[in-house]
Amino acid sequence: MSDLAMRISDAVNAVGLVDTHEHLLSEDERNRAAHDFGYLFPHYASSDLISAGMPPGLLEAVRATARPVLVERMARIGWIRKPPPMVAPSGADLSLEERWAALEPYWERIRHTGYGTCLRLAIRDLFGVQGLDKTTYQRLSAAIAASRRVGWYRHVLQEKAGIAVSLQDDYRTAVDRALFAPMVRLEHFACATTRGDLRNIEADTDRSVHSLVDLVEAMHAALDRYLFEGAVGIKIGIAYRRSLRFEKVAHADAERTFARLFDHLGEGPSWAEARPLQDYMFHRIIQAAVERDVPIQIHTGLQEGNGNVLENSHPLHLTNLCLEYGRAKFDLFHGGYPFMGELLAMAKNFPNVYLDLCWLYIISPSAGARMLHEAIETVPSNKIFAFGGDFIIPEGAYGHSLMARRIVSRVLAEKVTDGSLTEEDAATLAQRILRENAATLYRLKLDTHGQKPS
Ligand SMILES: [Zn+2]
């Protein structure tokens, strides 16, 4: 590495990160799931394994010891609808050796993808084992089992990854405030399709819901309660279930759909019937966020898992919202991958659109580097968020943070070398895109979260 690259890398490594997006298990949940190497495959790399040809039931057997905790969380995020079945014999009946034999041929096919690389970095740095193969899976499993302790999160996220604070995407606001600031979800107010869904909303908000006005008021009450409890923004992850195009719907048309929920005996209306109500409620959620000056994170681009409808998540579907809600703050996720050019143009064009590269570096390190190059050239530097881990396990967030720091360092060094930035500019940009921009938008109190310890 040249002296210049080394100095820039040092500057980037010194930044205490504001991580714009995580779904992490609580430390207690994590410690109940982390028994052996199967714990490392809750999502992402698991999707690559399926894409490589691994039968889904076999994957479930490989991660059998972690499965009860992982499946519950992933269903809540919306990455899976219902737990996939396990093949017989069940994973719990298989020895560690048999489970390794089941994984090995598929791991061999994916260990060099971005997801595989991220895991290999975490394995090396957190468990002191060089990679995952037939000579290491037993030692790695023993190291994972030995890591189940109070304080593992602080060690991995703060000491190793240098993350000052992470925005945690969850329905609950009950997160460890020393490490996380909560983002809340409101889409269950838009996607209520049965009387049971409405009863749950009534129970959760302690209000009666008999009209569309009642439903909107319940959503407002829930949002106000979450904000009072410390939520710093709203997350919308609905692109896993439908298109991001939210039409402007008249109250009367949405009310008609709402009334029909009571006709159904549990199966709920069809998507075509439900859409006016959903579209109406998403507009009301955006309006509620604008009234309270709360940022809105929206998933765009690739969905986690296998076999999704990619065009549903195209960021250009959001154009009407960006045009209508000039005072909104839309934090658009994942670089829009693979619709990156479109998202860059939106962040350049709309003052209310922010560009968030969370998840991107592990989908493709090269695409992440390319996009960051283009973003620095096209998007005002206050609107770029250059890191979000997007994992349910902290080890993944660590591996991703390492890749992010490397990529940001490399891109900034290339920009200094080609003369488009000074070295001082590069250091300032690193602080902004890895920390200050997100801290400003989400009004985080970073005085309680230090810089990365050297
Ligand atoms: Zn996510």
Image (spheres, grey):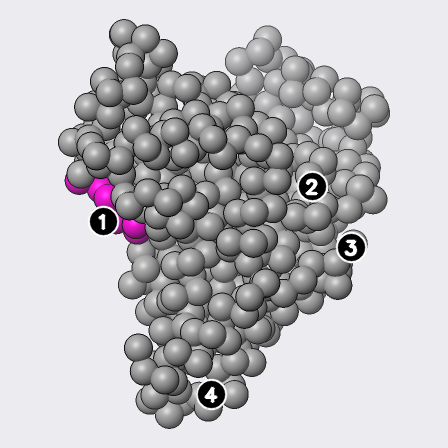
Judge by depth and name the residue closer to the eye, 274 or 38.
38
What's the residue at 56%, 54% (across, down)?
159
Give how far apart the Cα atoms at labels 4 and 1 are: 32 Å
Is ligand 1 closer than 8 angstroms to the Cβ of mark 3?
no
Task: Tell whether 33 sits left or right of 257.
Answer: left
Is ligand 1 closer than 8 angstroms to the Cβ of mark 4?
no
Mark 4 residue type:
Glu
Mark 3: few, some, or many residues within 10 Å (few <14, many ≥20)? few
Mark 1: few, some, or many residues within 10 Å (few <14, many ≥20)? few
Q: Which residue is mark 4?
A: 423
Which type of secondary structure does the marked residue at label 2 adopt?
Answer: loop
Judge by depth and name the residue closer to the eye, 283 or 121.
121
What's the residue at 51%, 55% (across, down)?
161
Q: Which residue is mark 3?
A: 291
Q: Disc 3 or 4, which lies upstream in sequence?
A: 3
Q: Are marks 3 and 4 in contact (CB under 8 Å)?
A: no
Give how far apart the Cα atoms at labels 4 and 2 are: 37 Å
Q: Are marks 3 and 2 in contact (CB under 8 Å)?
A: no
What is the x, y in percent for residue 446? 71, 62
What's the residue at 49%, 25% (across, down)?
33
Give how far apart the Cα atoms at labels 1 and 2 are: 34 Å
Q: Quick check: can you spot residue 111?
A: yes
What is the x, y in percent for residue 388? 51, 54
